[in-house]
Image (tube, helix red, strand yellow):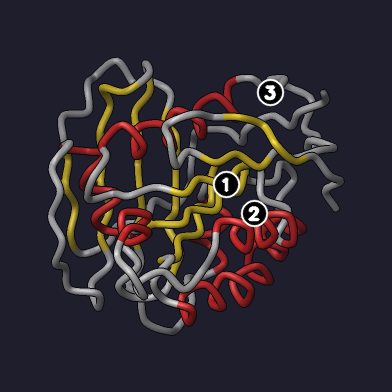
Amino acid sequence: MERFSPPATSLKKRISPPIAWNLGLTSKDPRIVKVILLGHQGVGKSALAVRFATKRYIGEYDCSIERIYKVDSFLDAAWEITDPPGYLPPPSELKLRWADAIVLVYSVSDRVSFDETSRLRFLVSHARKTRKVPPIVILIANKADLTYTPGERVVSTAEGRQRAEEIEAHAFHEISVRESVDQVMAVFTDIFKLLTELPGNSGQQTSSFRVRASTDGTLDATVRGTLH
């Protein structure tokens, strides 16, 4: 299957959000994987980033503040994760062009947040068209632990998979940031694999995408389709 190559790791203009969690970047200048998290307020974007960076779960955050998280001790790469505010306006074009991976997050207990991913698809589409090397796109359904609470879940797994197809995501994960650090790590492992498995100099976008679910911790390819 043909894949696209990730963009260069250098950046003329660095994004400097007001809050930065730097977890020890080394002087060896490892490869930097740049990720931006998008989604409605309260879906768990910040919790996802902190869970990945520290393995800890923290449930409450100020949704009006943009943060950047930095860590270099995962899969031989340094990571920069931008977590914009959960409120409007949407992130700037510069931030979308900055990212190697765009991660859209919604909550299975919040229909509004799910609908927001449909609106965000237009930002993703624009990012794909304005970059020589398009970013990979991951759709995350968070708060899967609420599946076991009657009346809490309002978005089904099938709907999530369908939305992933509609936005032409490269992967879909249904997870619980609160309950499973392994599922969180699987998301970022998938991002790394999708980037590193691609040809280094082709400059072409992949001709197909895969939708994955990690509710049980597995990464099974289930859907393929054509990217535009």
- Residue 157 in the image: x percent, y percent? 56, 56
Residue type of the residue flagged with mark 2: Arg
Depth check: give the residue in front, 9 or 162: 162
| Mark 1: amino acid | Phe
Q: Nearer the viewer, mark 1 or mark 2?
A: 2
Residue 183 placement, left or right of 23? right
Q: Secondary structure at mark 2?
A: helix
Against 117, residue 165 (above or below) is above
Q: What residue is disc 2 on?
A: 161
Of the pair 83 and 157, the residue shown nearer to us: 157
Q: Name the N-terminal-most of marks 1 and 2.
A: 2
Quick check: 95 left or right of 59?
right
Mark 3 or 1, nearer chain start: 1
Q: What's the mark number on residue 172?
A: 1
Marks 3 & 1, CB-CB < 8 Å contact: no
In the image, residue 22 sits, relative to residue 38, either above or below, namely: above
How far apart are the alpha carbons under marks 3 and 1? 19 Å
Look at 68% across and 20% down and name the residue there: 200
Residue 222 drawn at (x, y percent): 70, 37
Vertically, is 127 above or below 175?
below
Q: Which residue is mark 3?
A: 198
What's the CA distance linking mark 1 and mark 2?
7 Å
Residue 223 in the image, given as x and y percentages of width and height: 75, 41
Per the rendering, the mark at residue 7 is none
